[in-house]
Image (cartoon, rainbow, N blue to C red):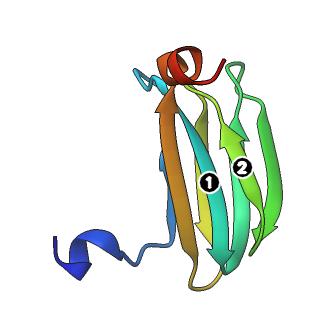
């Protein structure tokens, strides 16, 4: 893969609800912005994020990161089966 596949410039990113079966752990390496998480009933949780913040996002949760300045993230995705198979 080229760097264009790994490093992307965009003002926001996230996922919409629908068919997502994995958890995501998101660690903020650099930068800052706003994090929006949407519940099943159209309620929204919103707060700022910065380097060093860590998020655990459950399956079927819609969310958005709105980027204030250049940000770097680490994503770890895993399913419920991974937990039950490997973490006992």
> Does the residue at mark 2 contact the one at mark 1 (Cβ under 8 Å)?
yes
Describe residue 22's horizontal placement relative to residue 26 as left or right.
left
How crowded pointer 2 is (Cα within 10 Å; few <14, some 14-19, many 20+) is rated as: few
Q: CA distance from mark 2 to mark 1?
A: 5 Å
| Among numbered discs 2 and 1, the one appearing first in the sequence | 1
Q: Position of residue 11 (x, y in %)?
A: 50, 72
Measured from the top left, where is residue 12 in percent x and y? 52, 64
Residue at x-position 43% and y-position 73%: 10
Q: Which residue is mark 2?
A: 55
Q: Which type of secondary structure does the marked residue at label 2 adopt?
A: strand
Instruction: Please tell me which residue is depicted at 77% across the width and 30% down the height of the picture.
Output: 43
Res 72 → quadrant: bottom right
Residue 26 relative to residue 55: left or right: left
Q: Image point 40% across, 21% down: which residue? A: 19
Is 26 located above or below residue 40 in the figure? below
34 and 23: which is toward the camera: 23
Along the viewing direction, whichever of 49 and 23 lies nearer the viewer: 23
The quadrant in which the N terminus is found is bottom left
């Amino acid at each position: 893969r080229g760097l264009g596949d790994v490093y992307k410039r965009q003002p926001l990113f996230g996922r919409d609800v629908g068919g997502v079966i994995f958890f995501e752990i998101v660690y903020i390496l650099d930068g800052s912005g706003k994090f929006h998480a949407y519940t099943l009933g159209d309620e929204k949780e919103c707060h700022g994020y910065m380097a060093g913040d860590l998020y655990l996002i459950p399956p079927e949760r819609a969310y958005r990161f709105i980027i204030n300045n250049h940000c770097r993230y680490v994503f770890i995705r895993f399913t419920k089966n991974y937990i039950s198979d490997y973490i006992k």
